[in-house]
Image (cartoon, grey):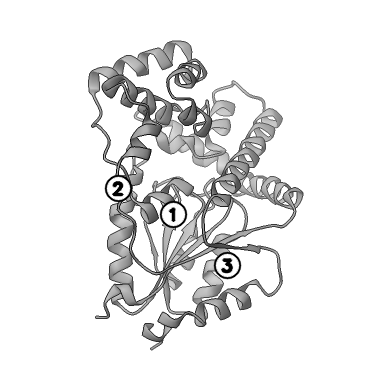
């Protein structure tokens, strides 16, 4: 087996709906690679249509990893992702193949590439008290509290993201130190490997917006409402579960609960998807040494293939 440091690790980043999966599959027809999903929703079983999960035929044709590894009642952390992805990178490169990390979850990419700070463990008592406050007053109220004690974290965390709000407040209550300070102060263990970073996105934001609206309409035609109906039938699932923060699922869930009309559900879901794409683009603009490419350029796969083939460590890749 080849030593894994001698093969480049490729990161294909981009906002939701930019065509990353299609791009990765086309690259796989030219280069010996395996795909590692970098998506916080694709880890969950049963969330297929609304996450645009690659279908089984694609996953049989090209090896995919870190898809369908968790039940939606479970939580999956960035630290768990880093540990699993690191092992997979070593295994794939050890086979002489290229690890291609594909997705839009910026936190996962950053945790993998830069490391993660050691944080205090969860405290059941503090977490229960904060959860009770969230249930009574709502996540927006807790977000305002977070703004007071840790404005930098509050700026990064959306008011409708109760899990991350609760964790940031929990860290502050346990230590008296804002989560932001923990991240800044603790040493990080970077992924000491040769990295290639690509970010693909449409050059026109309006074009991405059109694609996202069309994609959600296609998801509804494929049966997204029935998929969420099946999830609602499970007594261990509700909107507090991290899996159901996946964009679109919350809106359909609320539609099925009678809280939203159909048209209102569509509008809310498309708006939430656009907001997600905006946050992802902001995150990826902070990535250093990343090459940005128009996801709609006709020669995109040629450009990516030539760029990777020119990498000096490609001589260690096994093309057989």
Disc with the residue nearer the chain's start (1 vs 2) = 1
Neighbourhood count class around disc 1 (C-alpha, 10 Å): few under 14, some 14–19, many 20 upward:
many
Disc with the residue nearer the chain's start (3 vs 2) = 3
Identify which residue is drawn at 65% across, 41% down.
274
Query: Where does the image place residue 65, in percent across and percent down from the top left?
Result: 37, 61
Between the C-alphas of marks 3 and 2, the distance is: 26 Å
Would you place residue 142 above or below residue 23 in this image? above
What kind of element bears circle 1? strand
Depth check: 150 or 141 in front?
150
Depth check: 199 or 95 in front?
199
The residue indicated by pointer 3 is 23
In contact (CB < 8 Å): disc 1 and disc 2: no
What kind of element bears circle 3? helix
Identify which residue is drawn at 71% across, 72% down.
298
Nearer the observer: mark 3 or 2; the answer is: 2
Between the C-alphas of marks 3 and 1, the distance is: 15 Å
The residue indicated by pointer 2 is 80
Query: Where does the image place residue 154, in percent across and percent down from the top left?
Result: 49, 27
Residue 38, labelled with which disc? 1
Between the C-alphas of marks 1 and 2, the distance is: 12 Å
* Residue 240, visible in the rendered structure: no
């Amino acid at each position: 087996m080849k030593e894994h440091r001698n093969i480049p690790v490729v990161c294909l980043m981009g906002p939701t709906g930019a065509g990353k999966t299609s791009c990765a599959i086309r690259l796989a027809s030219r280069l010996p690679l395996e795909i590692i999903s970098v998506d916080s929703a694709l880890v969950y079983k049963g969330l297929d249509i609304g996450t645009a999960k690659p279908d089984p035929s694609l996953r049989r044709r090209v090896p995919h990893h870190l898809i369908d590894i968790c039940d939606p009642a479970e939580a999956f952390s960035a630290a768990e992702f880093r540990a699993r992805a690191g092992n997979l990178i070593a295994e794939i490169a050890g086979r002489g193949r290229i690890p291609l990390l594909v997705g839009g979850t910026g936190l996962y990419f950053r945790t993998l590439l830069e490391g993660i700070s050691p944080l205090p463990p969860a405290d059941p008592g503090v977490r229960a008290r904060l959860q009770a406050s969230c249930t009574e007053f709502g996540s927006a109220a807790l977000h305002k509290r977070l703004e007071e004690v840790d404005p930098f974290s509050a700026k990064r965390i959306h008011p409708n993201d109760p899990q991350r709000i609760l964790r940031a407040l929990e860290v502050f209550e346990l230590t008296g130190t804002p989560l932001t300070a923990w991240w800044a102060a603790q040493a990080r263990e970077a992924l000491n490997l040769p990295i290639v970073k690509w970010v693909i996105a449409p050059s026109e934001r309006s074009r991405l917006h059109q694609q996202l609206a069309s994609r959600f309409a296609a998801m509804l035609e494929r049966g997204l409402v029935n998929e969420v109906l099946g999830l609602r039938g499970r007594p261990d699932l509700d909107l507090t579960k991290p899996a159901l923060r996946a964009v679109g699922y919350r809106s359909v869930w609320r539609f099925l609960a009678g809280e939203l009309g159909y048209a209102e559900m569509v509008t809310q879901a498309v708006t939430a998807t656009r907001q997600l794409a905006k946050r992802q683009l902001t995150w990826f603009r902070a990535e250093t040494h990343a090459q940005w490419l128009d996801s709609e350029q006709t020669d995109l796969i040629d450009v990516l293939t030539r760029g990777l083939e020119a990498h000096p460590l490609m001589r260690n890749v096994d093309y057989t």
